[in-house]
Image (spheres, grey):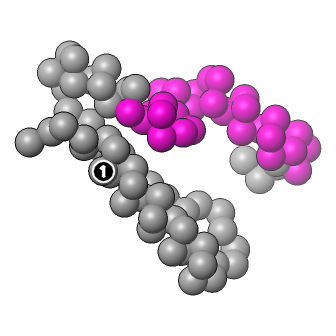
Amino acid sequence: MTLAYRLLGIRITNSLIERTAGSIFTGGVTLDDLVRDTNELESQKVGGIGCYVVEGLRQVDNKRLDDFYEFCMGAVKQVSEGQN
């Protein structure tokens, strides 16, 4: 990945990953992707979870962590909406 980022840039590398093997290992890039995939799994009686990571950050401050926390909490709420 590091080499691809250097040679192709972040945008192109991420796009290639999203269009190829990324779909095998992840539910997508956006929260809408995750909700769509979770709903599809549920329709097939398969459970799913959302996992969130902060990869590749070399410098982290409290603001960024607070924003990530808010995103995660909102995502959990949205994905689990309507479930018992």
Q: Which residue occupies the extreme bottom position in the image? A: 62
Residue wearing tag 1:
77
In the image, farthest residue toward the top: 44
Q: Residue furthest front?
A: 82
Type of the residue with mark 1: Lys
Could you tell me which secondary element the residue under label 1 belongs to?
helix
User: Residue 36 at what x, y percent from top left?
Assistant: 40, 26
The picture places residue 71, in percent across and down from the top left corner, at 47, 58
**Quadrant in which the C terminus appears:** top left
* CA neighbours of label 1 inside 10 A, class few (<14), some (14 to 19), many (20+): few
Q: Which span of residues is magenta-colored?
A: 6-35
Which residue is located at x 42 percent, y 35 percent?
A: 34
- Above or below 40: residue 81: below
24 lies above or below 77: above
Q: Is residue 17 magenta?
A: yes
Identify the image quadrant of residue 14. top right
Main secondary-structure element of the magenta-colored stretch: helix
